[in-house]
Image (cartoon, rainbow, N blue to C red):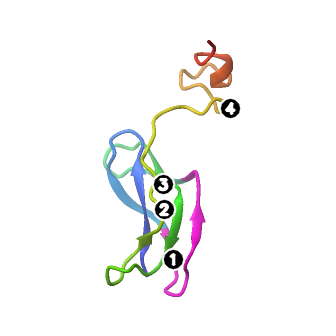
Amino acid sequence: MPAVPAVCTNCGAVFSSGIVLGDSLSGVSMSGSTAGTCPKCGGMGLVRGGVYSSGSSSGGGLGRATPRPPTNDPSPSGPCPCGGGKKYKRCHGAA
């Protein structure tokens, strides 16, 4: 059974998220899922958003139907990366 990969938000290392898809699953949608700590640097693991299936057209393994490029841009409604406790749009995102 294929495991869904995770990407470290600090160093960019790819490691297993611990999420395993059954052999017959297809079209599993994930968005904003975290996956524990990176074994390389201890940073937070993130499962990239998209639709996953247990089989791919390239002969098996984990297929990801809708790839999205990683982004480091903070969400306006999310917490500010400075750690001040405010939303980004009210803190460093204010124009």
Secondary structure beneath label 3: loop
Comes first in the chain, label 3 or label 1: 1
Give the residue number, with chain letter if any, for mark 3: 48
| Cα gap from disc 3 to disc 2, whole angstroms | 10 Å
Comes first in the chain, label 1 or label 2: 1
Q: With 77 as the anchor, is 12 left or right in this view?
A: left
Q: Amino acid at mark 1?
A: Leu
Magenta residues, start to end? 19-33
| Cα gap from disc 3 to disc 4, whole angstroms | 19 Å
| Cα gap from disc 1 to disc 4, whole angstroms | 31 Å
Give the residue number, with chain letter if any, for mark 2: 66
Q: Amino acid at mark 4?
A: Ser
Give the residue number, with chain letter if any, for mark 1: 21
Secondary structure beneath label 4: loop
Q: With 67 as the anchor, is 79 left or right in this view?
A: right
Name the mark nearer the viewer: 1 or 2.
2
Assess disc 2: are there few (<14), some (14-19) or many (≥20) residues with their C-alpha within 10 Å of its C-alpha: few
| Cα gap from disc 3 to disc 1, whole angstroms | 15 Å
Secondary structure beneath label 2: loop
* The furthest residue to the top: 95
Number of numbered callouts drawn: 4
Q: With 35 as the anchor, is 61 left or right in this view?
A: left
